[in-house]
Image: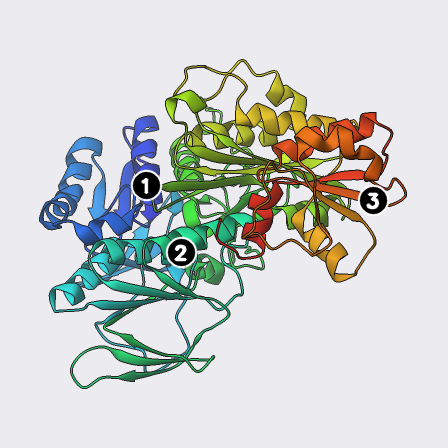
Amino acid sequence: MTRTIVIIGGAHGGPVAASRARQFNEKARIILVEKSSHVTWVQADLRHYLEEDLTLLEKSLSEKESYFRKYFNIDVRVNTKATALDMDSKFVLLEHKDGTERVSFDAVVFAAGAFSKSIDVKTLEGPNVSHFRNLEDVLKIKSAIHQGARKAIVLGCGFYGIEAAQGLKAAGLSVEIVEKSPRILPRFSLPTAQAIVHKLQEQGIKVHLSDYLVQANAKKQFGFDLQLASGKQLDADIVIVAIGSLPRAKILEDAGAALQKDGSVRVDEQMLTTLPSVYACGSAISVLQATTHERVWIPGPSVVERTAQIAGHNAAIIKEVKPETFKPVTSTQTLHVNNFWFARTGLTLSESRKHFGENAVFTSTVHSRASEAWVAGEDITVSLIVDRLSQGIVGGEVWGKNGVSRRIDMISVATMEKWSPDKLVDLDMAYAPLLGPAFDPLKEAGTLASLSLLEKTKSMPGETLALWIAQQRLFTLIDVSKRQNEKFKWPSNVRHMPLENLREQVHAIQKDKPIVISSRSGRRAFLAHRVLLQLGFSEVYHLDGGELSWSLMMGEAI
């Protein structure tokens, strides 16, 4: 008997699941349902479409339906919406221009994705207001630009907001971002988030933090006058609402499927929901985090792709065939801002502290070169998060112009496999002068972390130093940079003692107070730390990431 598989959702996850199902069941009847006018494989880097001619793109989208029919023999139903799932009679209720239709199924793959949050300002509506999640949004924005839009306000400084702002700027518009929180991107460390803000500002994109829209007044001809909570008045021809998204799961919820508190669909390792023969994948589901094994909602492209493959495979196979399973993830994320790549993986520092204990984890940060210095290597920052008890890497960040993906992928593997930092040091990495120094920044960060685990050195995060200063604790702060940075605002009691002169002046350092050592990048501070330890000083710390990380944390340009 022919097996019928209904796949709900035609953007990325749905098409992947459909093609995968066909690979493992040639005889199945596969129906792909999409509420919009086309299906798409991937919807990433939308910002680039804002500065391009979309004629070829629109032509390509119109050909997708026939491509799926001819190449995969899939029944594609565009402009069709799945409205209900009847588990007793096992049918999906579909709505289209000709009315409603009941389609019986043997298996369902739910890949309806997520939807953008709306802003609670009723007067903010019309053709010049858009989200930024799919190609329909891009077409709407392009239409406004063609009609004369020149000033854009982006509400929200998350991934989609940053993408939208850069695309609009590249398209020639004046752009400002309004973010309600006092900082952006909470899954990145504060120094890295501040570095992203600086890179946005370097492009001419103004960022308003700790502010939000309270009123929008439509102009007679075009655009809006916007009033922010701070009292600021902004002029906008077009407004992009990018304040976040939520899983789209109402059909499954109405059918009785279990959801998480965040609204995401609960699935097992085979992508099976709590409903029999109903699978889910993509941006609608929660998956297990590799370190904590807690369920998290991570609507990233790699998670969407792999969960869709598994859901499609398992929906198509017969019982005798072994199902595929999904492994816990490290939730790797990347962001491209002004020719810089920013990437993170694993737990954040706050998540690590919550899971392992406030003092159980530490960071190891290196500001170095992405290639050999003598071939004009670009700067790169590598930061590891390590759990002291297990001595395992639980997360990390990398950012710079080049070499970021290579290193963040290694940290992702290290997090997944619970490697100790010294395992990174022992890696036999591919070497070429343009790929990285012989002793790679990743190995530098691993070395610092290994020594910290052996208690031979102790790093201090910038937030701890800020707390000590605020509490007026008694300690000695030493800057061992070769030259003192006059623009850098250390507390007045900082002592400038270049590393080259440290051994000669060590007698002037008190041993009965804690000592915190800093330098521009932290490298010289680490070397000074090693010197003092071997000269009999006990309570010594080096500032993690040095002046560069501290400056970013304090919101100063570097």
Which dot, 2 or 3, sits closer to the camera? Answer: 3
Tell me if mark 1 has few (under 14), some (14-19) or many (20+) residues whose alpha carbon lies within 10 angstroms of its own. some
Q: Position of residue 245 (x, y in %)?
A: 43, 60
Which dot, 1 or 3, sits closer to the camera? Answer: 3
Q: Which residue is mark 2?
A: 114
| Position above or below: 247 against 306 | below
User: Residue at position x 90%, y 43% from top?
Assistant: 512
Identify the amino acid type marked 1.
Thr
Which dot, 1 or 2, sits closer to the camera? Answer: 2
Q: Which residue is mark 3?
A: 514
The disc, 1 or 2, on the residue closer to the chain's N-terminal end is 1
Q: Residue furthest right?
A: 512
Q: Which residue is mark 1?
A: 4
Local secondary structure at mark 3:
loop
Local secondary structure at mark 1:
strand
Q: Nearer the viewer, residue 102 or 273?
A: 273
Identify the amino acid type marked 2.
Ala
Q: How far apart, in angstroms, are the residues tagged by discs 1 and 2?
A: 25 Å
Q: Nearer the viewer, residue 321 or 202?
A: 202
The disc, 1 or 3, on the residue closer to the chain's N-terminal end is 1
